[in-house]
């Protein structure tokens, strides 16, 4: 890959942290911080998946996060998945439909 950002990212990346076990924590590559948010898939949702895009080459990624509170040590997980152009278009359309539905619901 010629892109200086995407060349540092695999098709699927995962970070996972557990409170109290910091030595075992893993994180997304630093290059992922350069991706730009395009839209939330479920606008206004809690920890919604986010469509992201590389500002250099335009490649799209799906960023997902999960959090679970546990007394023994909370768990945080982040996932980043490279998307095809078709998949990105589907997520954009889903986001548009969800935002429209939310507006209609709020107008009642």
Image (tube, rainbow, N blue to C red):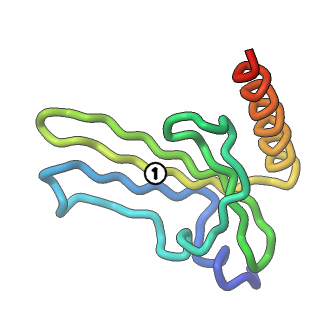
The residue that mark 1 highlights is 78
State the residue in front, 16 or 43. 43
- Which quadrant of the figure contains the N terminus? bottom right
Count every numbered label the image shows and give the total.
1
Secondary structure of the residue carrying numbered label 1: strand
Task: Determine the residue positioned at 20% across, 33% down.
Answer: 70
Residue 102 percent coordinates (x, y): 72, 27
Up-down relation of residue 26 to residue 72 (above or below)? below
Farthest residue to the top: give it. Answer: 108
Q: Position of residue 16 (x, y in %)?
A: 35, 52
Task: Name which residue lies at 67% across and 74% down.
Answer: 6
Residue that protrudes farthest toward the front in the picture: 107
Left or right: 9 in relation to 108: left
Is the C terminus in the top left, top right, bottom left or bottom right quadrant?
top right
Q: Residue at x 29, y 53 (%)?
A: 17
Which of 11/37 is in front? 37
Q: Position of residue 36 (x, y in %)?
A: 66, 66
Mark 1: few/some/many CA within 10 Å (<14, 14-19, 20+):
some
Q: Is residue 6 shown above or below 21? A: below
Q: Quadrant of residue 85?
A: bottom right
Identify the residue shown where x is 71% and y is 70%. Answer: 54
Q: Is residue 70 left or right of residue 28?
A: left
């Amino acid at each position: 890959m010629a892109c200086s950002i995407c060349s540092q990212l695999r098709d699927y990346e995962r970070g996972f942290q557990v409170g109290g076990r910091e030595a075992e924590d893993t994180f997304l590559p630093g290059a992922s911080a350069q991706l730009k948010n395009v839209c939330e898939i479920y606008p206004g949702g809690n920890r919604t998946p986010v469509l992201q895009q590389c500002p250099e080459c335009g490649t799209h990624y799906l960023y997902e996060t999960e959090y679970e509170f546990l007394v023994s040590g909370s768990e945080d997980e982040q996932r980043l998945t490279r998307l095809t152009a078709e998949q990105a278009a589907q997520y954009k359309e889903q986001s548009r439909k969800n935002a429209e539905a939310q507006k209609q619901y709020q107008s009642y």
